[in-house]
């Protein structure tokens, strides 16, 4: 069988010496401000019955729109599949009839 030919890498020369990096000390210009570990307490959100109905209605509307979009995409895929299937049957019929003539 065929064997791959790998390129040969040149051997490293002795003149190359490793580079030594010396660390430097960083002195900040100003002191860091300590951050408080606790955040300020926040008030709770209270929904009125009207606001709650609006949120529920909006969520329902979003669910209906997303559902309609998904159903329409599924319908488009189904129509495409049916049309491809019909095309395949017609093409097979044409090819079979062409073979029977000769």
Image: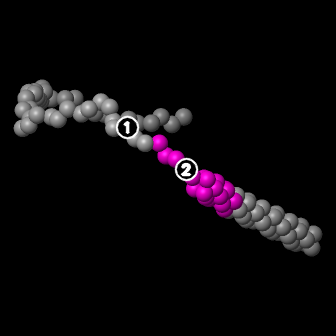
Q: Secondary structure at mark 2?
A: loop
Of 57 and 76, the residue lying toward us: 57
Q: Is residue 25 left or right of residue 65?
A: left
Position of 38 with respect to 80 (left or right) is: left
For label 2, the crowd category at 10 Å Cα-Cα, with few meaning under 14, some 14 to 19 and many 20 or more, is few
Q: Relative to residue 43, is residue 29 drawn left or right?
A: left
Where disc 1 sits, the SS reads loop
Residue at the spot 24% in from the left edge and 33% down from the top edge? 35
Task: Point out the tag, 2 or 1, that comes first from the N-terminus.
Answer: 1
Find the magenta span and give its range: 44-65
Q: Residue at x 73, y 60 (%)?
A: 71
43 left or right of 9? Answer: right
Between 78 and 93, the residue placed more toward the observer is 78
What residue lies at 6% left-to-right and 32% top-to-bottom?
Answer: 27
Q: Is residue 83 visible?
A: yes
Identify the residue at the far right of this view. Answer: 100
Most extreme residue toward the front is: 48
Which label was assigned to residue 4? none
- The local crowd at label 1, few if under 14, some if 14 to 19, many if 20 or more residues have their Cα within 10 Å, is few
Split into 4 quadrants, where in the image is the N terminus? top right
> Which is more toward the observer, 61 or 49?
49
62 shown above or below 8: below
Q: Quadrant of residue 99?
A: bottom right
Residue 65 location (% of width, % of height): 66, 62
Q: Is residue 94 depicted above or below 15 in this figure? A: below
- Dots 2, 1 in contact, CB < 8 A: no
Residue 55 in the image: x percent, y percent? 60, 55
What is the number of the mark on residue 41? 1
- The residue singled out by tag 2 in the image is 47
Q: Position of residue 93 (x, y in %)?
A: 88, 68
Q: Is residue 16 magenta?
A: no
């Amino acid at each position: 069988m065929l064997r791959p030919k790998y390129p040969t890498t040149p051997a490293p020369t002795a003149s190359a010496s490793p580079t030594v990096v010396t660390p430097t000390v960083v002195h900040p210009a100003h002191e860091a401000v300590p951050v408080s570990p606790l955040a300020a307490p926040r008030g709770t959100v209270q929904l009125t019955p009207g606001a709650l109905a609006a949120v529920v209605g909006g969520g329902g509307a979003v669910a209906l729109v997303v559902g309609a979009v998904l159903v329409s995409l599924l319908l488009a895929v189904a129509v495409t599949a049916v049309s491809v299937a019909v095309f395949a049957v017609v093409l097979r019929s044409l090819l079979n009839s062409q073979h029977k003539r000769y």
